[in-house]
Amino acid sequence: MKKFVYILTAASLLLLAFQIIKTQLVVTVVNELGNKEAGATVQLFETEEDYKKETNVAAEAVTDAKGIARFKDLKAISYYIIVRKEDRDNAGGGEKTSKLEGGRINKITVVIQ
């Protein structure tokens, strides 16, 4: 009878984790006082043109009671972001994410005022 021995290297574990975890983004929305904002709409755009015209939304979510919006299965790119709640938004700052790291849970905080 033949026996098989499996050796998991750090590289193979990393590859396995990359395949399991898809690129995600967790957006925490706060107001100018630092309080978390539930019920804010968060929109992601892949291009500046789409962002400026507010067309072709790549993903959209509403923040939960803790002010968090979660996005799963995204591309590992930078996104333009619009966050709105009532008459407040993130215009004038925090309008583009850094390039997301593939196979990871990326986190950002956006201020609305």
Image: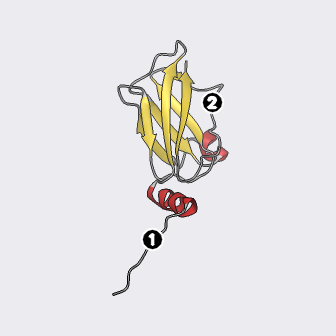
What SS does tag 1 mark? Answer: loop
x, y percentage for residue 103? 53, 53
Report the amino acid beneath label 1: Tyr
Identify the mark at residue 55; answer none if there is no mark.
none
x, y percentage for residue 44? 53, 42
- Asked if the residue under mark 1 is in contact with the one under mark 2, i.e. CB atoms within 8 Å, the reply is no
x, y percentage for residue 5? 43, 74
Residues 43 and 98: in front is 98
Residues 21 and 88: in front is 21
Residues 18 and 102: in front is 18
Whole-number angstrom distance, CA of label 2 to CA of label 1: 46 Å
**In the image, is 49 to the left or to the right of 19?**
right
The quarter holding residue 71 reads: top left
Of all residues, the one furthest to the bottom in this rendering is 1
In this view, 4 is above or below 63: below
Q: Nearer the viewer, mark 2 or mark 1?
A: 1
Residue visible at 53% across and 36% down in the picture: 107
The quarter holding residue 96 reads: top right
Identify the mark at residue 94; answer none if there is no mark.
2
x, y percentage for residue 98? 65, 41
What SS does tag 2 mark? Answer: loop
Specify the quadrant that holds the N terminus: bottom left
Report the amino acid beneath label 2: Gly
Residue pointed to by mark 1: 6
Specify the quadrant that holds the C terminus: top right
Residue visible at 51% across and 16% down in the picture: 34
Residue visible at 50% across and 59% down in the picture: 13
